[in-house]
Amino acid sequence: MKIFDYSFLKDKPIPAQTVNLLTTVEKLTIDRRTLIDSYPKLFEELTKIAIVQSIISSNAIEGIVTTDERIKGLLNGSVSPINHNENEILGYKDVIDLIHHNYNEYSFTEEQILAFHQLLLSYERPSYAGKYKTSDNVILEITKNGTRSVRFRPTPAKETQSAMEQMILAYMDARDDSNVNQLLLIPCVILDFLSIHPFSDGNGRLSRLLSLLLLYKNGFTIGKFISFENQINLNKKEYDQSLKLSSDNWNNSANDYYPFINHFLVTLIRCYNELDKRVSILSSKVTNKKERIKITIEKSLVPLSRKELMELWPDIAVDTIKKVLIELQNEGTIQKIGNFKNAKYRKI
């Protein structure tokens, strides 16, 4: 059985690349803290956008999608779910709302993890919700020609509860050790959670929610303003590769956590970079949707596609973006490059 022990984070040298990434994240966190405190209304607007993006992106990673208009209706309560995907989206919304607004009330315990899972699956699969898997599961890898192979074998069902208990106890031990850096510890425990794969469904989505919980509780609240999940989704191949590298030999307690740690830190840095881009637009007190799209294109160093604009501003309807892009072209403000789905737009 896997031995959970995070003492290597203090007893062994940390790779130079990881040290550099860690230093960058910590500096960005300190530097942006004053900015967040100085502009509460600005960051309230960013929070609304981030929650929408997080719900869309974390579910999209698992292939759970619906239309943009349906998403907005589900989140504001104007429509009811009509299928499996929309039920799962609502479950994610409920959990992320709790974490965003009340993270100090929750602890990383077995009881709380089960409660979050119960809520996550409550709309669609209540019989599985809040219960560990009862049969073994595997992580499959599918090649381009459709051939399937087992990439990873998680903890057997009969050992799952014990593994979860041991993982959480090891986390608590390291959490309370002042010599262990929490930004390194968090991705380690998230990797272990994913490798145990304790539930029949919802493991990936819950891992991202638990990442936010642990980050917030340790003072790293960037995910409240810029979607952490969206950055994972935008760089999913990198995420999958880091997970694969760090899970090799996991069952033998001989895995290397650092590929996953490094990707985790890079994702946080990308969040801060995205924050700077959005603050430069919103801090100019631009609330008009047309002006936001215009300034976004003007400030971008590279041409932007309609999809990229939708990802930047999920609160703006796709039809509105289409209309504004046509208006800006007719005004001679922006230029369209390419045609149809691959078209991009830049300042003239």
Image (spheres, rainbow, N blue to C red):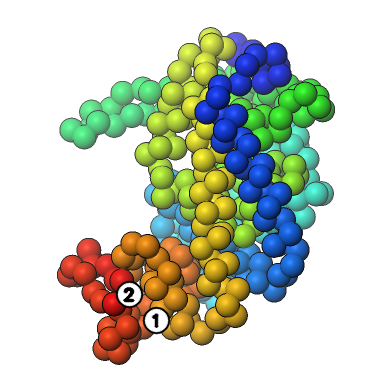
In the image, residue 317 above or below residue 92: below
- Say few, some or many: other residues with alpha carbon within 10 Å of mark 2 (under 14 / 14 to 19 / 20 or more): many
Taking the view exactly as shown, the residue that stands out farthest to the bottom is: 331
Helix, strand or loop for disc 2: strand
Sequence-wise, which precedes: disc 2 or disc 1?
A: 1
Q: What residue is drawn where x is 46% and y is 65%?
A: 312
Which quarter of the figure has residue 132?
top right
In the image, residue 13 above or below residue 243: above
Which quarter of the figure has residue 77?
bottom right
Give the x, y percent position of residue 198: 58, 30
Q: Viewed as shown, does residue 91 lie left or right of 149?
A: right
Q: CA distance from mark 2 to mark 1?
A: 19 Å
Does residue 73 appear in this view? yes
Q: Amino acid at mark 2?
A: Lys
For the residue pair 276 and 210, the one nearer the viewer reads as 276
Give the x, y percent position of residue 6: 68, 20
Give the x, y percent position of residue 13: 63, 16
For the residue pair 74 and 183, the one nearer the viewer reads as 183
Q: Amino acid at mark 1?
A: Thr
Circle 1 residue: 320
Q: Which quadrant: the C terminus? A: bottom left
Does residue 229 appear in this view? no
Circle 2 residue: 347
For the residue pair 104 and 308, the one nearer the viewer reads as 308
Q: What residue is drawn where x is 18% and y is 68%?
A: 338
